[in-house]
Amino acid sequence: MGSVAINGVIQPDTLHPQFPNHDHPHGDRDQSGHPHGHSHSHGSKHSPEPASNIHVIPIHQGILAKNDRIAAQNRSFFRDRGILVLNLLSSPGAGKTALIERMAGDLPQLCYPPSGTPLKIAVIVGDLATDNDAQRLRHAGAAAVQITTGNTCHLEADMVAQAMQGLDWQGLNLLVIENVGNLVCPASYDLGETLRVVVLSVTEGEDKPLKYPTMFKTADFVLVSKVEVAEAVGCDLALAIANIQRVAPQAQLFEVSARTGVGLDNWYQALLAAMPGAGQPEMEFH
């Protein structure tokens, strides 16, 4: 059975109680879009079941329904406190942590227009193993709670609910949930976030939006990252952007570099505009 650790504390596995010995990453998807709709064996040999003895149990619907109930509770908690919550998704290595590091340094210099106070940011980090990213973000000045998922390839709403207990909510304006690096499974799970942000790096290939459309179709924002090396790695940036717009015309798109800062002013303007109660966003540096 798989297990989840939050800041190093092993939590009871409530994720897949229906699937003992079923904790490996999943790449298959059923027609509902959920990644667990397969029926292969797990080491034991089965005799073929007569067709009349086969019963179809909609387990995936139950899992998602439970997840959605907890996500609604999370969302209500965030809304009552006026906190903007981002669910940050990408492939491994797309630059999520570097982007949050940069945001953790820049955003406290901005004023939140309704209150006039500096922005305060916290992060919940999801990873299969290690708390390396959470340590990086703490060094950058952000409060960070690590969720170590073991073999689970995505975050779920109850993991976030547990991690929320480790945060100080006093004066918090922005919570970033850095999801497990994966362009498939995380798209199926509502965490209670306000907005979904998908990061696509120029090193991944221009056709990623076409190969993984579900992820991009659920995005409110798409950030094309590492644009400073696009030419060096032979990325056709115009084609990548065209593919994003083809799959996800609803998403606002930004070209950014966490290393050079290119494009981040526009990204921060969009965040300020999305803050609960925000009127006309203003960039006010202290």
Image: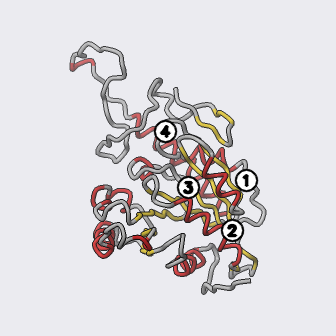
Identity of the residue drawn at 41% across and 47% down: 185
Which secondary structure lies at badge 4?
loop
Residue flagged by tag 1: what amino acid is it? Leu
Pointers 2 and 1 in contact (CB under 8 A)? no
Mark 1 or 3 closer to N-term? Answer: 1
Pointers 4 and 2 in contact (CB under 8 A)? no
Mark 2 or 3 closer to N-term? Answer: 2
Pointers 1 and 4 in contact (CB under 8 A)? no
Label annotation for residue 173: 2
1 or 3: mark nearer the eye? 3
Q: Mark 1 and mark 3: span between their CA atoms?
A: 15 Å
Q: Which residue lies under the disc numbered 3?
A: 178
Which secondary structure lies at badge 3?
strand
Q: Mark 4 and mark 2: span between their CA atoms?
A: 29 Å
Mark 4 or 2 closer to N-term? Answer: 4
How many numbered circles are shown? 4
Rendered view: 59 above or below 247: above
Q: Which residue lies under the disc numbered 1?
A: 167
Q: Mark 4 and mark 3: span between their CA atoms?
A: 15 Å
Q: Which residue lies under the disc numbered 4?
A: 152
